[in-house]
Image (cartoon, coloured by chain):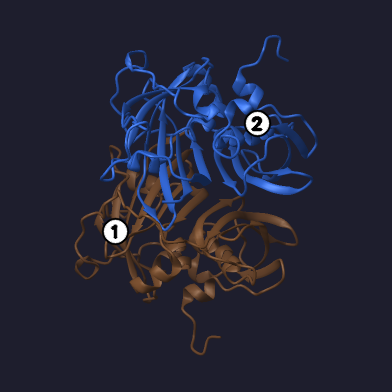
Chain colours: A brown, B blue
């Protein structure tokens, strides 16, 4: 299928077809603290659905629960079509290693999106164009996954080399996100980018603390063919948090096309130790 | 366990214990358009986890996918502990009828919430006290579930008897929500209330259109013992929408204690025909 070296993202999210049992392998190119970058794990699970012969329609909603760190190496994906009608499908995917130990579970809703009345109450955040924004230096960061993205902060750029904040800072960020090696944004990379924000607590405290996403939910507000028509390699994103309490904090986010269309919204809850 | 008639909410969410297979029955008191009110279905699925002998910790995150209408009558709940460690548990629940047909699936994360650094960047919306707000008349509405709640709109009260809006109205609502028969709010009723907003599209268009929640995710930002200490029977809530497009629209929401603590946040994606 590929005649040239695939994009690292496609290599990282590659799956081998089975009937209900699919398989994949973690990528060292998208490594986080103690396991693969969650966005790529989510995209890999969604890819198994997208490439499944029974798949109908476009991703509408996906929730991933990160139950345990995924270990470096191969994994199996148990892909199951739970329920389907003419226009929607409900799927579940379980990622297991070592012959059955569950590391990650996902549920997804796919839909054939029919034309309808349309309205976007949310309005695109103001930002200078991608080309005018300054790339964020990821050199000092150890996680390989951050180097696969081109982050360009418009607001809330972290100063993670500096001292922790004396008083809590803002949890809000506005930034452009692109694949470091340009790649047309599709549903898979959009999903991955919906997890590509730095932990909100790092922003608020301006320091790294033990952190891990527990559950991520992303909604897609565009059909795949509409997204293809946008033909974009970067998105404008905002992320914020409502609360950090008793070892868990949340994150909300929105991903916009440069043309001002809301492509996806996302929310997650994450563990922290502080 | 109960020596007096239970609250309708507790009757509606009652489950009978099994090992992995639990059972329940729909309630006519919480009926929506073509099936039970989703909030009560979600709360019933969570109750099966909460009453499971292996349950440890408090609800942290719950996602419910509504795959097909739940028919009036009995249902089975397949409750499964997917993964557990000392402080978190991952569960899944499948609601089936007629010997296996899946209607609803849920995943949940439970956690023993340890003390930590705490901060609430979000601030409680301004509102007059519950007692000073005017109850919303639900008399003209056919769905029985709305009569189980005492809605008191502070902003965005729908005028559903009036003509549809000529131009789209606001998707934002701010309201107090209480059980119509007062009941101390616990994790189960908090979850149910997180689905107790009217469809955002009804607000924007000021008319009923075919509508159904497809996927609901709620995060709990309080431990069960903290919530019990609040000892409250009503919450202040806000709900909004970002986009309606190609037959689907989203909803975001936040649920606050009268004391200004953020108790839960929620998001959902819903089908509409318009």
Point out residue B138 in the picture as x, y percentages from the top left corner: 44, 24
- Please give the chain letter of the residue carrying mark 1: A
Nearer-the-camera pick, A194 or B77: B77
Is the residue A50 above or below the residue B215 in the image? below
Write down the chain letter for disc 2: B
Q: Residue at x 61, y 70 (%)?
A: A25
Q: Residue at x 59, y 72 (%)?
A: A51
> Which residue bears the numbered disc 1?
A175
Determine the image quadrant of residue A14. bottom right
In this view, the residue farthest toward the top is B4
Question: In the image, A128: left or right of B116?
Answer: left
Q: Residue at x 36, y 73 (%)?
A: A229
Q: Nearer the viewer, residue A251 or B33?
A: B33
x then y, percent, for residue A170: 28, 43
Judge from the rendering whether residue A232 lies leftward or rightward of residue B183; answer left or right. Answer: left
State which quarter of the image contains the N terminus of chain A: bottom right
Residue A177 showing in the rendered view: yes
Secondary structure state at the residue bearing disc 1 = strand
Which mark is in front, 1 or 2?
2
Binning the other alpha carbons within 10 Å of mark 1 as few (below 14), some (14 to 19) or many (20 upward) gives many
The residue positioned 49% from the left and 85% from the top of the image is A5
Secondary structure type for disc 2: helix
Q: Is residue B24 left or right of residue B161?
A: right
Q: Residues under labels 1 and 2: Cα distance? A: 40 Å
Front residue of A63/B71: it is: B71
Q: Quadrant of the C terminus of chain A?
A: top left
Residue A144 seen in this snapshot = no
Picture quadrant of residue B224:
top right
The label on residue B47 is 2
Residue A3 percent across, percent down from the top left: 51, 90
In depth, the one of B230 and A19 nearer the eye is A19
């Amino acid at each position: 299928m590929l005649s040239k070296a695939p994009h690292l993202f496609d290599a990282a999210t590659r799956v081998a077809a089975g009937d209900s049992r699919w398989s994949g392998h973690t990528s060292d190119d998208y490594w986080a603290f103690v396991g693969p970058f969650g966005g790529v794990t989510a995209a890999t699970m969604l890819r198994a659905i997208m490439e499944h012969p029974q798949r109908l329609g476009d991703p509408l909603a996906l929730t991933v629960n990160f139950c345990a760190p995924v270990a470096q190496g191969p994994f199996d994906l148990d892909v199951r079509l739970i329920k389907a009608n003419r226009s929607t499908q409900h799927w579940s995917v379980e990622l297991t290693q070592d012959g059955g130990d569950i590391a990650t579970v996902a549920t997804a809703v796919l839909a054939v999106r029919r034309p309808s009345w349309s309205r976007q109450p949310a309005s695109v955040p103001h930002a200078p164009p991608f080309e005018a924004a300054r790339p964020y230096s990821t050199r000092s960061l150890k996680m390989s996954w951050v180097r696969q993205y081109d982050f360009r902060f418009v607001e809330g750029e972290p100063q993670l080399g500096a001292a922790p904040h004396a008083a809590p800072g803002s949890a809000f960020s506005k930034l452009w996100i692109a694949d470091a090696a340009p790649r047309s944004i599709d549903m898979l990379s959009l999903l991955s980018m919906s997890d590509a924000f730095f932990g909100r607590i790092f922003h608020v405290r301006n320091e790294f603390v033990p952190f891990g996403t527990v559950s991520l939910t992303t909604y897609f507000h565009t059909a795949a063919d509409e997204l293809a028509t946008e033909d974009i390699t970067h998105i404008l994103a905002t992320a914020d948090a409502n609360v950090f309490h008793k070892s868990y904090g949340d994150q909300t986010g929105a991903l916009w096309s440069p043309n001002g269309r809301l492509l996806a919204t996302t929310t997650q809850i994450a563990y922290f130790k502080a």
